[in-house]
Amino acid sequence: MTASLLEQLAPDHAPPPLGWWPLAPGWWGLMGLLLMALALVMWWHQRRQRPSVKRWQRAALRELAQLQTAADNATLARGLQQLLRRCAIARYGRETVAALSGEAWIAFVVRHGGSDWAGDSGRALLRCAYGSDATTPDAPVSPAHRERWLHGARAFVKCARASR
């Protein structure tokens, strides 16, 4: 080669430094995976913070099983009233449930799954829970009433899950 041709060549220079933008496809994929993982963690955390319907239903059914061993009808009736009130407030809200009493409360329970509380059984429960002693002759409570109270309460608690 001749020296004149070599002199005509441009001087050596390094290519420009590589920029960080635009990103390579692998980095885009990694960012997508990180965003999905972040969304999943946020969803899981939010779900854990929310009161679980199944959790309070299991607790209510455990308490109902303990109430079945109540010796007297008044204790059973008061315990059922308190348990179902708490469940109804948790499920339907305080505004809806707090004002209900007497026949309106029994009608609410019947409408939302506790159909065994309709009629004489519900009235006997109210008499027993709020005043009349279950042993008085004018307000006798039969074992059949007790079974209907318990069955109606169990159906009310389980029905709340189905309607959610």
Image (tube, grey):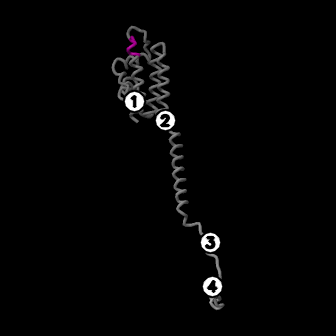
Q: Amino acid at mark 1?
A: Cys
Could you tell which of marks 2 and 3 lies nearer the N-terminus?
3
Could you tell which of marks 3 and 4 lies nearer the N-terminus?
4
Q: Which residues are magenta?
A: 139-146
Q: Which residue is mark 3?
A: 17
Q: Residue at x 38, y 34 (%)?
A: 163
**Seen in the image, is 32 located left or right of residue 118?**
right
Question: Element at badge 2?
Answer: loop
Q: Which residue is mark 2?
A: 52
Q: Residue at x 44, y 16 (%)?
A: 131
Q: Position of residue 81 (x, y in %)?
A: 44, 23
Could you tell which of marks 1 and 3 lies nearer the N-terminus?
3
Quadrant of the rendering where the C terminus is positioned: top left
Based on the picture, tell me whether residue 159 belongs to the magenta stretch. Answer: no
Numbered tag placed on residue 123 in the rendering: none
Q: Which residue is mark 1?
A: 159
Could you tell which of marks 1 and 2 lies nearer the N-terminus?
2
Camera-nearest label, 4 or 2: 4
Q: Position of residue 80 (x, y in %)?
A: 45, 22
Question: Element at badge 4?
Answer: loop
